[in-house]
Image (tube, rainbow, N blue to C red):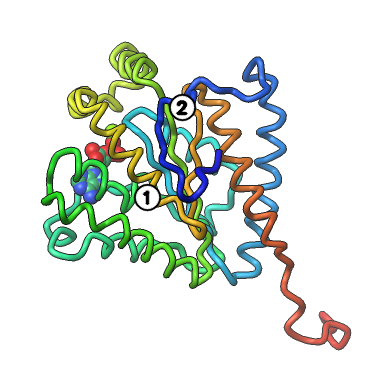
């Protein structure tokens, strides 16, 4: 669901359990596959045109399903035209620059779909929650982010920002799953269990990011994410709809084809 620019977001008004009109994952499966086929067709057009880029930003609490969304929604894309970047704790080098420096370099070029697993929004989320910079520094960043995103949009980068909305109870279940399943041990980090204690501070920080940075040129989309299959469908549908609205066309031939004979 699109967060209308100017809305003051209160997360408790959005149900993370929402699953649209679907009673079961099976019902949504066919819809998802249709979207993924369409996505693949549109990606080919985007690549052929090479006039604009699509930047998909994924944010959400730990275990909200950022990795899973990439795995399931981007599965049908050609790796040729996709780049994924996961933003981690900044290095010393990165910290010695402005906070957008490392991000700007990862913005996809025309023809490409770029996916950010976390993003410049961490600089008003984790950084705010843990007071890694003074309040007046992070306070300024919302406006800087909006300006930065405007710059990208004016350079034909389409920005889709998704907040994967899960409940605290669902996070507990997912963390417990990681503790119980040997194929998921690697995903468990003590850090995640600790971050959970800051749940309400993160909620507040997310509410501000969604309220202040849902702009006409780069709006936020809130995705109910307790049900993974519904989350995947919503993200896929939103990307497809956005690409469709571009009315892309294959470029005309660069030479007079009637004069060409393949010997
Ligand atoms: P993960 O996404 O689980 O691999 O974890 C990446 C970690 O990097 C998370 O704990 C993020 O909060 C942290 N991180 C990402 N960007 C920043 C940032 N700008 N400042 C501080 N921590 C960050
Ligand atoms: Mg993690």
- Image quadrant of ligand 1? top left
Q: Secondary structure at mark 1?
A: helix
Q: Secondary structure at mark 2?
A: helix
CA distance separating discs 2 and 1: 17 Å
Residue labelled with disc 1: 212
Question: Marks 1 and 2: in contact by CB < 8 Å?
Answer: no
Residue plotted at (41% across, 62% down): 149
Residue plotted at (42% across, 70% down): 151
In the figure, is residue 168 to the left or right of 244?
A: left
| Quadrant in which the C terminus is drawn | bottom right
Residue 228: x percent and y percent?
A: 51, 25
Say which of 202 and 54 sits in front.
202
The quadrant in which residue 99 appears is: bottom left
Relative to 83, residue 154 above or below: below
The quadrant in which residue 182 appears is: top left
* Residue 51 visible here: yes
- In this view, the residue farthest toward the top is 180
Ligand 1 within 8 Å of disc 2? The answer is no
Say which of 246 and 32 sits in front.
246
Relative to 95, residue 109 above or below: below
Mark 2 or mark 1: name the one nearer the start of the chain.
Answer: 2
Residue plotted at (41% across, 25% down): 12
Residue labelled with disc 2: 13
Q: Residues within 10 Å of mark 1 (few under 14, many from 20)?
A: some
């Amino acid at each position: 669901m699109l967060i209308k620019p100017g809305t003051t977001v209160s997360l408790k008004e959005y149900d993370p359990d929402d699953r649209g009109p679907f009673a079961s994952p099976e019902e949504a499966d066919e819809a998802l596959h249709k979207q993924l086929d369409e996505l693949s067709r549109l990606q080919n057009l985007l690549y052929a045109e090479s006039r604009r880029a699509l930047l998909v930003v994924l944010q959400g609490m730990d275990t909200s399903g950022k990795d899973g969304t990439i795995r399931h929604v981007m599965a049908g894309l050609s790796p040729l035209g996709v780049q994924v970047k996961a933003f981690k704790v900044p290095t010393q080098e990165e910290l010695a620059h402005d906070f957008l420096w490392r991000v700007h370099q990862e913005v996809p070029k025309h023809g490409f779909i770029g996916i950010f697993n976390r993003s410049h929004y961490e600089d008003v989320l984790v950084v705010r929650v843990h007071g890694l910079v003074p309040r007046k520094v992070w306070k300024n960043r919302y406006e800087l982010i909006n300006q930065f995103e405007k710059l990208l949009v004016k350079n034909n980068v389409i920005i889709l920002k998704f907040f994967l909305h899960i409940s605290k109870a669902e996070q507990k279940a997912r963390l417990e799953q990681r503790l119980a399943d040997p194929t998921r041990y690697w995903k468990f980090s003590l850090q995640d269990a600790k971050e959970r204690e800051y749940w309400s501070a993160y909620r507040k920080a997310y509410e501000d990011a969604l309220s202040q940075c849902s702009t006409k040129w780069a709006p936020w989309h809130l995705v109910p994410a307790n049900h993974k299959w519904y989350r995947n469908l919503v993200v896929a549908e939103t990307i497809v709809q956005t690409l469709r609205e571009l009315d892309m066309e294959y470029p005309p031939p660069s030479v007079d084809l009637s004069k060409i004979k393949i010997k």
